[in-house]
Image (tube, grey):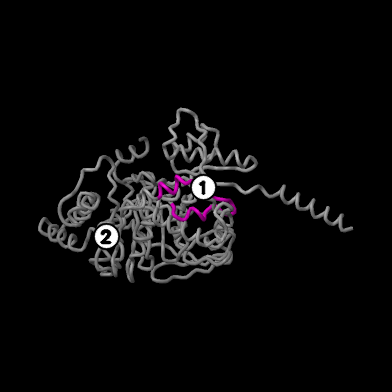
């Protein structure tokens, strides 16, 4: 009987082992660790292997004040904590369960022996990348029944690995979305039968000039707070979702900023998305706004008009602070003279262009009146560099972050956490025009915050669709 039980348990164990795929071994390139210092803990139940050349390159990059140097130092400190957390030898692998706070359940292996290079004659063995490839080849031979995968952000490194018959992957954990077409747009078109399916038990009432509807139906559970819903037709509906609870939702009609009587600093919205954007920008309960859109959709103009109205007319904020990443499109022109504001001036051409437009909205003011208005506006707009943002707190400010697609998620966090009481933060950008060499549409800080803030009652997002700059700019954005 005992033998039968043992036989039964053996068969069940062999079945389990057949069902459970073997744990993979990921070999990390240095650029992965410097790109994401927490990448050691991002491989779940799989094991991680660090070649000695990766540690050597970390040591070479740890000096300086750049983002790469900071990340290299952070990785080194993390590795020190991991190695000290285990009393077992490094050869057996260090469990990552405790140091990662249960994010990873695999083991960390560090190269502890010299590995003979079995690379093709054309590849120089002195090069760090090729030494890492030699380690991957050695591990593949040592573990024939196990998947050994090189993880690198370097495309050429991955191509070389595949040419040598090795499995190589990009590091995907930093990407918010694989496909940016799935990014939250901030609005949803209601189906034609919406009122038939959601209207029977509807409640409606008026408050502060807006109509509110409490609806019940299957679509309500898919709605997000501060998402815009619309329906075109003979009686169009444009509304904002205020509350969602199960299959019940509360929606509120919008202020119509297409009408001249509701103009914002002389500006009226020219399309549906611009109207949605102004409803977010002019709403004091929304502390964080993100506007995405191609060139010429009016992101900066609408934001500045809303900012000036709330600073100079309603006095909701004390001043406008504008900042952006200083990444040149072409060759860098070198050092710029002057104070912080004077150094930032060449980067703020968009601000000057939009202020010229806003200053011409009052036809009755005359040249003297417009000059006085220009001086007043300039005194309430401060231009700041990103380099000096650490440790600051902005109280009662209207903070505009332009060209936000060039920010990393870490830089975005640094900026948004500067907001003190009464401050509104607006992020503007076009994820199709990223100038930072190490960012993609999926890993941009702008994509990151759009995805993370969706559904929060004090934030809103809208993707502007239609260009309003000129027919030439629209055609260029379409065909080029």
Query: Left or right: 200 with respect to 433?
Result: right
Label 1 – label 2 distance at C-alpha: 40 Å
Residue 400, x across and y down, in percent? 30, 58
Q: Quadrant of the C terminus?
A: top left
Residue 309, x across and y down, in percent? 26, 63
Please tell me whether mark 2 sits on a helix, a strand or a loop: helix
Q: Nearer the viewer, mark 1 or mark 2?
A: 1
Q: Which of the 4 quarters of the picture holds residue 96?
A: bottom right
Q: Nearer the viewer, residue 127 or 266?
A: 127
Residue plotted at (23% across, 58% down): 383
Q: Nearer the viewer, residue 118 or 339?
A: 118
Query: Left or right: 168 with respect to 368?
Result: right
Q: Earlier in the sequence, mark 1 or mark 2?
A: 1
Residue plotted at (65% across, 41% down): 145
Dot 1: few (<14), some (14–19), or many (≥20) neighbours within 10 Å? some
Residue 62, x across and y down, in percent? 36, 52
Residue plotted at (38% across, 53% down): 408
- Disc 2 marks which residue? 388
Q: Quadrant of the N terminus?
A: bottom right
Query: Left or right: 133 with respect to 276?
Result: right
Q: Nearer the viewer, residue 210 or 300?
A: 300
- Disc 1 marks which residue? 111
Q: How many marks?
A: 2
Residue 41 among magenta residues: yes
Q: Which of the 4 quarters of the picture holds residue 359?
A: bottom left
Dot 2: few (<14), some (14–19), or many (≥20) neighbours within 10 Å? few
Q: Point out the stretch of residues depicted in magenta.
A: 36-58
């Amino acid at each position: 009987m005992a033998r039968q039980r043992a036989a039964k348990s053996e068969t069940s164990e062999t079945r389990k082992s057949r069902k459970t795929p073997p744990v993979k071994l990921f070999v990390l390139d240095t650029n992965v660790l410097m790109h994401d210092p927490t990448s050691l803990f991002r491989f779940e139940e799989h094991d991680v292997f660090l070649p000695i050349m990766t540690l050597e390159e970390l040591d070479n990059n740890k000096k300086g004040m750049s983002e790469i140097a900071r990340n290299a130092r952070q990785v080194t400190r993390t590795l020190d904590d991991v190695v000290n957390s285990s009393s077992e030898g490094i050869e057996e692998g260090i469990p990552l369960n405790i140091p990662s706070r249960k994010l990873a359940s695999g083991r960390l292996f560090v190269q502890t022996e010299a590995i003979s290079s079995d690379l093709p004659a054309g590849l120089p063995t002195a090069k760090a990348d090729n030494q890492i490839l030699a380690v991957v080849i050695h591990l593949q031979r040592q573990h024939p029944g196990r998947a050994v995968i090189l993880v690198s952000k370097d495309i050429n490194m991955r191509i070389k690995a595949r040419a040598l018959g090795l499995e190589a992957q990009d590091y995907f954990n930093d990407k918010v979305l694989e496909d940016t077409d799935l990014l939250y747009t901030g609005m949803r078109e209601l189906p034609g039968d919406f009122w038939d399916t959601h209207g029977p038990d509807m409640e409606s009432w008026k408050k502060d000039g807006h109509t509110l509807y409490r609806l019940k139906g299957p679509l309500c559970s898919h709605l997000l707070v501060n998402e815009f819903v619309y329906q075109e037709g003979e009686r169009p509906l444009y509304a904002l979702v205020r509350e969602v609870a199960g299959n019940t939702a509360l929606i509120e009609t919008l202020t119509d900023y297409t009408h001249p009587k509701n103009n914002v600093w002389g500006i009226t919205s020219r399309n549906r998305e611009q109207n949605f954007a102004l409803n977010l920008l002019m709403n004091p309960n929304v502390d964080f706004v993100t506007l995405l859109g191609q060139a010429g959709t009016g992101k900066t103009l609408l934001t500045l008009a809303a900012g000036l109205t709330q600073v100079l007319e309603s006095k909701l904020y004390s001043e406008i602070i504008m900042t952006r990443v200083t990444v040149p499109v072409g060759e860098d022109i070198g050092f710029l003279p002057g104070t912080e504001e004077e150094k930032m001036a060449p980067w703020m051409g968009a601000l000057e262009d939009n202020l010229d437009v806003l200053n011409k909205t009052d036809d009755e003011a005359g040249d003297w009146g417009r000059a006085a208005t220009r001086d007043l506006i300039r005194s309430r707009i401060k231009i700041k560099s990103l380099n000096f943002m650490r440790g600051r707190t902005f109280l009662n400010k209207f903070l505009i972050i332009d060209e936000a697609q060039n920010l990393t998620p870490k830089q975005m966090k640094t900026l948004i956490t500067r907001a003190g009481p009464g401050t509104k933060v607006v992020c503007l950008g076009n994820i199709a025009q990223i100038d930072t060499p190490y960012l993609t549409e999926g890993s941009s800080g702008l994509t990151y915050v759009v995805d993370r803030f969706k559904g929060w009652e004090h934030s809103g997002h809208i993707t502007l669709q239609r260009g309003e700059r000129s027919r030439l700019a629209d055609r260029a954005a379409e065909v080029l």
